[in-house]
Image (tube, rainbow, N blue to C red):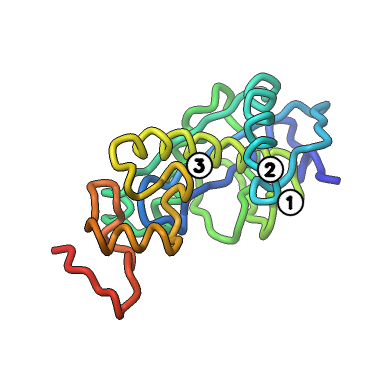
Amino acid sequence: MLLINHSDYSLECGTDEAGRGCLAGPVTAAAVILPKAFENSILNDSKQLSESKRDILKPIIEAQALTFGVAHVFQEEIDSINILNASILAMHKSIDLLAKKPQFIIVDGNKFKPYNDVPYETIIKGDGKYLSIAAASVLAKTHRDIYMNTIHEEYPMYNWKQNKGYPTKEHRAAIKKYGITKYHRKSFRLLPEQLKLDIL
């Protein structure tokens, strides 16, 4: 049973990201403030949910949240500032989009940077403990998936509709065969050493 709040603040924001380990596309973060009375028996860490359940939850969260924000940080910036900084930047950008200023922020994982003067706490596996982080994980994942489905139409040979940019065997085989696209993260190891690709 996931808990609604970690703190005593009524405007507690949960934030999480999706796509950190991908070879292509953005890292996407969401921030969500839920009402104290929010309940949902399905909601959990997005990685524990099927795609169909995430798609059911997305409009419920967006309708019932007091406020939410979703932000992408794209591959060029990931390559420029590294994936950790890009993930935190995406979370900050998603919090920027909230209609209400949070009084407290809870973050999935163990890395974050101060957001203005708002107190925060990092919580390892927080997306399986607190509803607002779980809700943020679902929104980050579903919004990123929508984006990856869109760019799949431009480069169908990488099958991003299926693998969403993650380093599957199929994705890496396509990189080896077709090279890289403008959506690939050049700072990532796109192929194992034995299949080295010249990306300069």
**Is tag 1's residue or tag 2's residue first in the polypeptide sequence?**
1
**Mark 2 lies on residue:** 134
Foreground residue, 73 or 144? 144
Pointer 3: residues within 10 angstroms few (<14), some, or many (20+)?
A: many
How packed mark 1 is, by other alpha carbons closer than 10 Å (few <14, some 14-19, many 20 or more), is many
Residue lying farthest to the bottom in this orientation:
194
To which residue does mark 3 refer? Answer: 29
**Which residue carries the number 1 mark?**
128
Q: Residue 184 appears at what percent x and percent y?
A: 29, 52
Q: Amino acid at mark 2?
A: Ala
Amino acid on which disc 1 is placed = Gly
Q: Earlier in the sequence, mark 3 or mark 2?
A: 3
Distance from disc 3 to disc 2, alpha carbons, whole Å, reads 12 Å
SS for dot 2: helix
Q: Position of residue 141 (x, y in %)?
A: 55, 41
Tell me if mark 2 has few (under 14), some (14-19) or many (20+) residues whose alpha carbon lies within 10 angstroms of its own: many
Residue drawn at point x = 32 percent, y = 65 percent = 190
Identify the image quadrant of residue 172.
bottom left
Looking at the image, do the residues carrying marks 1 and 2 touch, with CB atoms under 8 Å apart?
yes
**Residue type at tag 3:** Ala
* Residue closer to the observer: 58 or 31: 58
Q: Quadrant of residue 71?
A: top left
Q: Quadrant of the C terminus?
A: bottom left
Q: Give the residue drawn at x 36%, y 46%.
A: 25
